[in-house]
Image (cartoon, rainbow, N blue to C red):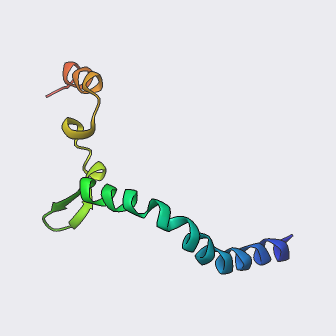
Amino acid sequence: MKVLIFTQELVSVALTPFVLWFSLPDCAPAIIDFFREFSVHVDGLGYICSFAEFNFERHGNVKVRMFVSIYHVS
């Protein structure tokens, strides 16, 4: 069983570049657009995905934000 898993891992390492070679060119513009739209600069960190900031005003659900503000304890 371990030999089979090891062989599968080796084959996947060898085949992954070829899979990406043929599939990536079709979706490359969408990937680039994602990075352009959702990258922000944070001092001390550099550029990060804006979802990692948990900025609910930009990416959040208005209903969830209202729910949190009702039960916010100061």
Q: In this rendering, would 71 be left or right of 14?
A: left
> Which quarter of the picture shows residue 11?
bottom right
61 or 65, nearer to the observer: 61
What residue is rendered at 26% in x and 20% in y?
Answer: 67
Residue drawn 84% across the image and 73% down it: 4
Q: Residue furthest front?
A: 26
Residue 14 position (above or below residue 43): below
- Could you tell me which residue is drawn at 16 percent across and 61 percent down? 42
Among the 4 quarters of the image, the one containing residue 1? bottom right
> Residue 52's spot in the image, x, y percent?
30, 52
Q: Where is residue 21 in the image (x, y as percent from the top left)?
A: 55, 74
For the C terminus, the image quarter is: top left
What residue sits 23% from the left and 37% below the top?
56
Q: Please tell me whether residue 65 is drawn above or below residue 49 in the rendered image.
A: above
Vertically, is 74 above or below 1?
above
3 sits to left or right of 34: right
Q: Position of residue 33 (x, y in %)?
A: 31, 57
How many dots with numbers?
Answer: 0
Near-viewer residue (11 or 56): 11
Question: Which percent across, then down, holds residue 41?
Answer: 17, 62
